[in-house]
Image: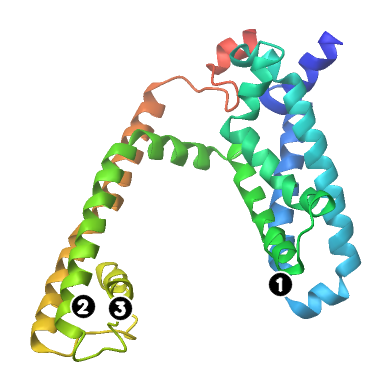
Amino acid sequence: MKRIQQRIFELLEVAHPDDTSSRVTDLFLFVLIALNVLAVILETVEDLSTQCAPIFLFFEVFSVAVFSVEYVLRLWTCTQDERYAHPILGRLKFAGSWPAIVDLLAILPFYLPMFLAIDLRMIRALRFFRLLRFLKLSRYSESMRIFGKVLRSERAELLVALFVAGVLLIIGSSFLYIVEHDAQPEVFSSIPSAMWWGVATLTTVGYGDAYPITPLGRFLGAIVAIMGVGMFALPAGILASGFAREMDKRREEPEACPHCGKPLESAEAD
């Protein structure tokens, strides 16, 4: 039994370069996840959804069965990883990890209506939660793993930039509400409604459905727009520098196994 558990763990997690079965398993799950996302998108086409309803239903049941078995097997074999070695606490720790939560969210929308009394509108909403299966691709996509590492390493700088942008949004929207409320009470009826203008202006989208018409309002709007160009460029610059550092580190470090994190040479030796 121990040998079977170890082999299943290798198939699902380790993916040695010379392990064909593990690579085929990863490829199968990758394609299945991608097809699930495509199916959710295609189901929104009314004619296609009506004509191919049995096919969509069969594919959904098949996918949930595969993902459910995958989740149970990952939970069973996670003790092969030294981080989750304890048979009970280790599995609880694994169940609370981000990849395991994503795996659970991928199948939960299918099972919830079976056990809870949920109205039709909520069932429709749950169906779109199947798009969360897209996050499962992070197990198999090197690009998504790098993006996640960059977000974690640069989170402090990103939070500072977002905080400053939020302060600018509140101050700009509040001042424009004071200046424009009497001239356009229907457009700037409150500070929250003025924040819609603030978001569109700071992000330089400029939908044009709300804009100042008084001279002072236009002056304030111009200042907010100019500040927004620089302020909303900050997160892009932070992410760009983070990506550059991460790529430099990856060039200097030996290639690592995408699942266990060990250098490939040591992973193969194990």
Residue 115 in the image: x percent, y percent? Answer: 82, 49
- Dot 1 corresponds to which residue? 44
| Residue 19, quarter of the rendered image | top right
Residue under the image location 26 percent in, 41 percent down? 157
Q: Secondary structure at mark 2?
A: helix
Q: Is residue 154 above or below residue 197?
A: above
**Disc 3/disc 1 C-alpha distance (Å):** 29 Å
Q: Can residue 31 be seen?
A: no
Q: Earlier in the sequence, mark 1 or mark 2?
A: 1
> Mark 3 belongs to which amino acid?
Gly
Q: Is residue 245 above or below residue 189?
A: above
Residue 70 in the image: x percent, y percent? Answer: 78, 34
Residue under the image location 77 percent in, 22 percent down? 76
Of the numbered discs in the image, which one, if any, rests on residue 177?
Answer: 2
Would residue 40 appear left or right of 174 to someone viewing this image? right
Of the numbered discs in the image, which one, if any, rests on residue 206?
Answer: 3
Count of numbered circles on the image: 3
**Disc 2/disc 3 C-alpha distance (Å):** 17 Å
Looking at the rendered image, the quarter that the N terminus falls into is: top right
Q: Is residue 183 above or below residue 24?
A: below
Q: Is residue 211 above or below residue 48?
A: below
Q: Earlier in the sequence, mark 3 or mark 1?
A: 1
Residue 191 in the image: x percent, y percent? Answer: 27, 73
